[in-house]
Amino acid sequence: MKPAGALILAAGMSTRMGQFKPLMEFNGESMIRRVVRSLKEAGASPIFMVVGYRAQEIRMHLAGEGVRFVENPDYASSQMFDSVKIGLEEAVRVCSRILITPVDAPLLSVPVIQRVMKEDAPLVRPSYKGRPGHPVLLSAALAQVLCLYQGEGGLRQAMESLPVALADIPVEDETVYMDADTPEEFENLLKIAAEREKNR
């Protein structure tokens, strides 16, 4: 399995959630720490994180975790894709491949991350029954091209504009496409986690 670094997007203001998502507790652990832990356990290194809103709290919360922080000073007025570009510009300096995931994916699993990392294709993402999910994996060369994209549609549209085919990898994990953007989505992910624990 080729090495890959990771980029976690955590600059947003969690407006739809009504609480600060990165530090929300999910089964006894903050969402942000769960995502970092899963990436580490899967072998991703180094781990970059784009921060903005309440950045200092995140830095303190993850002190000692070895995360490399990148600041998005315009977090209040920018889009998620702006954070992607800010983070990738740092990550490509030291990574040949980079995984990208949002911070609000507390059920991001080690097997899925490793399944994606096993692929040699320059642009990869997992999918469940045709629905694309996280994390996306791309080569450093493609990341540099992605950072030049100026069109509409954010990360998804930018990926579709790249000069290579996107490799969708089927996985048997419905949570790959599930984020916790709202309280309802958060509760749903908690239920799924509880169900999985019960069926172990």
Image: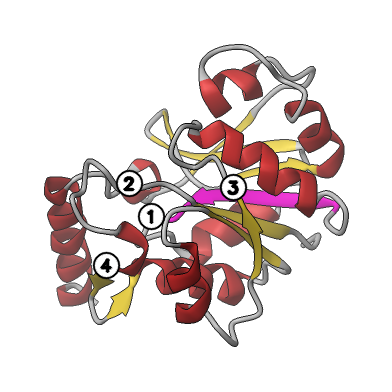
Q: Are marks 2 and 3 in contact (CB under 8 Å)?
A: no
Q: Secondary structure at mark 2?
A: loop
Looking at the image, tell me whether mark 2 or mark 1 is earlier in sequence order.
Answer: 1
Q: Along the horizontal axis of the image, is 44 left or right of 92?
A: left
Distance from Cα at disc 3 to Cα at disc 4 = 21 Å
| Position in image of residue 129 (x %, y %) | 37, 33
| Position in image of residue 137 (x %, y %) | 66, 45
User: Dot 4 surroundings within 10 Å: few (below 14), some, or many (20 or more)?
Assistant: some
Q: Which residue is mark 3?
A: 72
Looking at the image, tell me whether mark 4 or mark 2 is earlier in sequence order.
Answer: 4
Residue type at mark 3?
Answer: Asn
Q: Which residue is mark 4?
A: 24
**In front: label 4 or label 2:** 4
Distance from Cα at disc 2 to Cα at disc 1 = 5 Å
Q: Is residue 121 magenta?
A: no
Distance from Cα at disc 4 to Cα at disc 2 = 13 Å
Q: Are marks 2 and 1 in contact (CB under 8 Å)?
A: yes
Q: Which residues are magenta?
A: 96-104
User: Dot 2 surroundings within 10 Å: few (below 14), some, or many (20 or more)?
Assistant: some
- When asked about the image quadrant of residue 138, the answer is top right
122 lies above or below 118: above
Q: Secondary structure at mark 3?
A: loop
Residue displayed at 13% across by 61% down: 191
Quarter that holds the C terminus: bottom left
| Position in image of residue 63 (x %, y %) | 55, 84
Q: Which residue is mark 2?
A: 179
